[in-house]
Amino acid sequence: MPSAQTAGSIWTRAFALLCLAEFLGYAQHFALQPTLPLYITHLGGSPFIVGLVIAAFGVTSVISRPIIGYWVDRWSDSGMMIFGMVGQAVSILFCFAPFSAAVVFSNALRGIGWSSMAAAGYTLLASAAPPARRGEASGYFGGVQSSATIIFPAVSLWLLDASCGGFYASFAFAVLLVLGAATAAWVMSRATPQRTHAAKLDAAEPWWREIVNVVDRQILAAALLIFTLNLSLPCFSSFVVLYARQLGVSHFAWYYVAVGVTSALGRPLLGRFSDKLGAARSLLIAFGLETSALLIMPMASNLSGLILCGALWFMGAAIGGARIMALAIEQAPSARRGRAMASFSTAFPLSNGIGAFINGLIVDLAGYGWMYAIAGIMCATGFILIWKQWAKLK
């Protein structure tokens, strides 16, 4: 992909196509977020099984990340993005088998495709973003991703309740979305020249060591921060639909519309703001908003209360995610950017998987109120990470 560093403009054709591909890829993911928990409970599974389904996605995404990062560097970033998107489309087909085990396998397979899409997408972003505007570019990039939450989870829920819909209609909808993402990525790859890959520059390090050595120490601080920031994401993306049903909240699809608007508008605006505010103060605000939302959530008893807490959490995720992504891009060595960004992108599915497993276990043992309270305490550990990195972040 041609660099936008000299042009100064963020919205090049390559960046626009990248954002379109990411939008449709994330739309597929967000369409499945409320569907899979309801499908598992429909099949007779408990919240703990829901946690296992989400955790399976995180585990395979993390395990596959080393070899994915290797091939992003050695072969093709856009090619690996297309591979990941087509792989996700195939994996969703296993959900048509009405067994919990099939759904677990499907989500585990989808995690590998997600790994490829994510590592390649972050690498392409790093090539496209001008250095002086990386926070802003990361904000737009994250805003495009999160804007899919405005309508697609709600559409998925409406499909479930439609007379001609149901779970299978929702799954078919997700397949079409991710195939559209693959098409956009293919157009991007045909329309823009590819960057020179590391294989052409330096073959001194054995291939097996590159794959095994996935953890890039220069990116570790950013990875730990994004891991902690997103550890409670399943509370507001997947388990919240089950919590709402327990409370008897109707018309819950509007929750996803409201928090989607908050996240989509917040990421580019707050990403730009974070460039001026600085990393340290931006992250204090981010973790403060998320922790507050989690601790207030057990007191919410209606749709308005759930939307308020969700909006607070996603505002925190917006400002924190944009700033941490910019930090990761700054710290990633250009010669092995694919591997470094693969290390960074591992933190998101890992936090989502571990968080989902813990959340499902707590719900089975103590209920949803305790799930949100304990998640709030875990989120607050982010302040310790900020304190330890304060000098570097400033």
Image: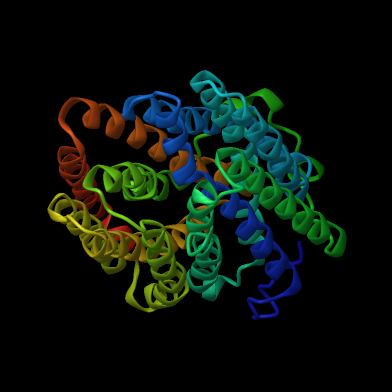
Q: Nearer the viewer, residue 391 or 132?
A: 132
361 vs 251: above or below: above
Residue 196 visible in the displayed image: yes
**Left or right of 156: which side holds 266?**
left
Residue located at (44% from left, 41% from top): 347
User: How many numbered circles are shown?
Assistant: 0
Residue 217 visible in the displayed image: no
Q: Nearer the viewer, residue 206 or 60?
A: 60
Q: Residue furthest right?
A: 190
Tell me the quadrant of the picture where the N terminus can be found.
Answer: bottom right
**Left or right of 120: which side holds 300?**
left
113 vs 337: above or below: above
Q: Which residue lies furthest to the left in this view?
A: 299
Residue located at (63% from left, 47% from top): 174
Residue 234 percent location from the top left of the image: 36, 43
**Left or right of 2: which side holds 320?**
left
Q: Which of 295 and 142 is in front in this view?
A: 295
Tell me the quadrant of the picture where the C terminus can be found.
Answer: bottom left
Among the 4 quarters of the image, the one containing residue 316 = bottom left
Among the 4 quarters of the image, the one containing residue 125 = bottom right
Residue located at (22% from left, 42% from top): 375
Residue 236 percent location from the top left of the image: 33, 50
Q: Which of 246 and 319 is in front in this view?
A: 246
Q: Which residue lies furthest to the front in this view?
A: 163
Residue 102 percent location from the top left of the image: 56, 22
